[in-house]
Image (spheres, rainbow, N blue to C red):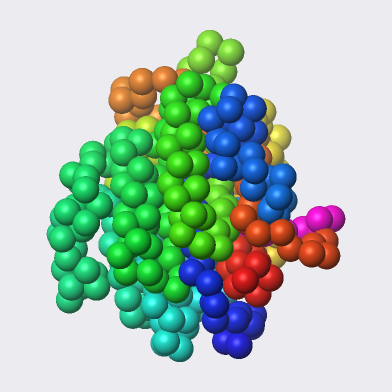
């Protein structure tokens, strides 16, 4: 048994694959299964193990992927967004450097103990975090052609997969992840493999949409192939996805920086949107979670109440309350945390968000309303308590300790 971040894990006796499907609201599976697009998943839901779990808030990619591979919430591992304000350097930075990680990953511990490990992620922004401290194979679809034995544990990835490197804004970026996972299991047979996709499709297509169903059908075929190789498979998601529009199909946005500039003075407050990353075409950096830094002299409680009273706001919490409620590192969030309702997103200033690239009505995530995600295993687990609160970061526990 290995102990990682206070939780114990058994070394795998069967090749084990943990999959994080970016943006997978449970209804995507339901609609695709109902339409006959996921025959493997239909069988697994009947014969394996399936629960609806909670991901961590903010319901963004980096905090949840790192929660899954560490088995603990952001209050322990430290990654509380894709983007943060670093008070020490007075700068706003991407949270993709391992220096922000405060806990070891399950993958690094397993590889140190002798397990052969592999990580394939869609976007390169996650690669260094997911592979930190891990001995083995770790590369992204986005930069698969740049992978080397020295840096990634493997070279010649496109030739191995039999596919060219896909465009970052495409369904093929995620398909490359699954195809690579299948190729690695066939040729390298890792003991443990983590696959993480991108939510490009989910940002553009709702559950049951023909394009969404085709995407899940593709996923189903690759998962069936891995199952056929004898793998234990645990599938979960980093967050759900919802439409964020008014009745006229235009984005329903509350621009917090503009409001606070008007209530205080321009620039007196600083609004941080942790959804921010280099890939903003499909969401315009608009999500349902924001953190706000206020000047010390401001009346924090009065501003909290004023924000809370706005139409479209789910809740506003002071730092300590937000850290406790959402299991966040208090030193990496602002004086206030703001979460919007299901159909509403938060922005900074209207002038800072370019929404011209949106081709369809806005769909995004970040809030409490995107917290429900699937947690599915292709093995039955006897005595599973289906009434407890399951988390997406229970995936490795179930896969390694209960499904072998």
Q: Residue at x 49, y 69 (%)?
A: 15
Q: Which residue is drawn at 17% across and 54% down?
A: 159
- Residue 375 vs 46, above or below: the answer is below
In the picture, measured across the screen, residue 130 lies left or right of residue 162, that is: right
Q: Can residue 60 be seen by looking at this rendering? A: no
Q: Can residue 151 be seen by looking at this rendering? A: yes
Count the labels in the image: 0
Quadrant in which the N terminus is drawn: bottom right
Q: Which of 280 and 380 is in front in this view?
A: 380
What residue range appears in magenta?
Answer: 386-393
Q: Which residue is drawn at 55% across and 50% down?
A: 237
Residue 282 placed where, x, y %? 37, 32
- Residue 381 vs 240, above or below: the answer is below
Q: Nearer the viewer, residue 258 or 130?
A: 130
User: Looking at the image, which residue sits at the far top?
Assistant: 248
- Our reading of the magenta stretch's main secondary structure is loop
In the picture, measured across the screen, residue 6 lies left or right of residue 216, that is: right
Residue 171 falls inside the magenta stretch: no
- Residue 302 vs 327, above or below: the answer is above
Residue 259 placed where, x, y %? 51, 35
Quadrant in which the C terminus is drawn: bottom right
């Amino acid at each position: 048994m290995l102990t990682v971040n206070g939780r114990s894990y058994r070394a795998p006796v069967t090749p084990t694959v943990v999959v994080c499907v970016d943006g997978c609201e449970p209804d995507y599976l339901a609609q695709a299964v109902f339409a006959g697009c996921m025959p493997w998943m239909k069988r697994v839901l009947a014969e394996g193990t399936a629960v609806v779990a909670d991901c961590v808030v903010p319901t963004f990619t980096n905090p949840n992927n790192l929660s899954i591979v560490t088995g603990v919430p952001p209050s322990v591992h430290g990654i509380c967004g894709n983007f943060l304000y670093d008070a020490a350097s007075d700068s706003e930075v991407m949270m993709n450097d391992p220096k922000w990680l405060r806990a070891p990953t399950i993958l690094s511990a397993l590889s140190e103990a002798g397990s052969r490990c592999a990580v394939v992620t869609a976007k390169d922004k996650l690669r260094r975090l997911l592979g930190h401290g891990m001995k083995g194979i770790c590369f992204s679809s986005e930069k698969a052609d740049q992978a080397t034995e020295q840096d990634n544990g493997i070279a010649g990835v496109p030739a191995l997969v039999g596919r060219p490197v896909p465009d970052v804004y495409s369904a093929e970026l995620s398909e490359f992840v699954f195809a690579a996972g299948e190729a690695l299991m066939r040729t390298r047979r890792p003991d443990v493999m983590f696959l993480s996709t991108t939510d490009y499709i989910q940002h553009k297509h709702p559950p049951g949409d023909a394009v969404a169903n085709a995407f899940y059908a593709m996923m189903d075929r690759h998962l069936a192939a891995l199952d056929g190789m004898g793998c234990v498979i645990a599938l979960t998601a980093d967050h759900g996805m919802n439409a964020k529009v008014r009745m006229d199909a235009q984005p329903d946005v509350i621009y917090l920086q503009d409001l606070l500039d008007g209530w205080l003075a321009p620039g007196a407050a600083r609004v941080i949107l942790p959804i921010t990353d280099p890939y903003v075409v499909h969401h315009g950096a608009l999500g349902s979670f924001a953190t706000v830094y206020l000047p010390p002299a401001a009346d924090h409680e009065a501003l909290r109440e004023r924000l809370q009273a706005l139409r479209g706001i789910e809740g506003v919490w002071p730092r300590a309350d937000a850290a406790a409620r959402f299991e966040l590192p208090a030193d990496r969030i602002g004086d206030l945390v703001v979460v919007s309702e299901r159909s509403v997103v938060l922005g900074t200033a209207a002038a800072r968000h370019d929404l011209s690239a949106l081709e369809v009505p806005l769909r995004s995530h970040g809030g409490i309303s995107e917290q429900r995600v699937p947690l599915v295993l292709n093995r039955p687990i006897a005595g599973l308590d289906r009434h407890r609160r399951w988390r997406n970061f229970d995936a490795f526990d179930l896969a390694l300790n209960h499904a072998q």
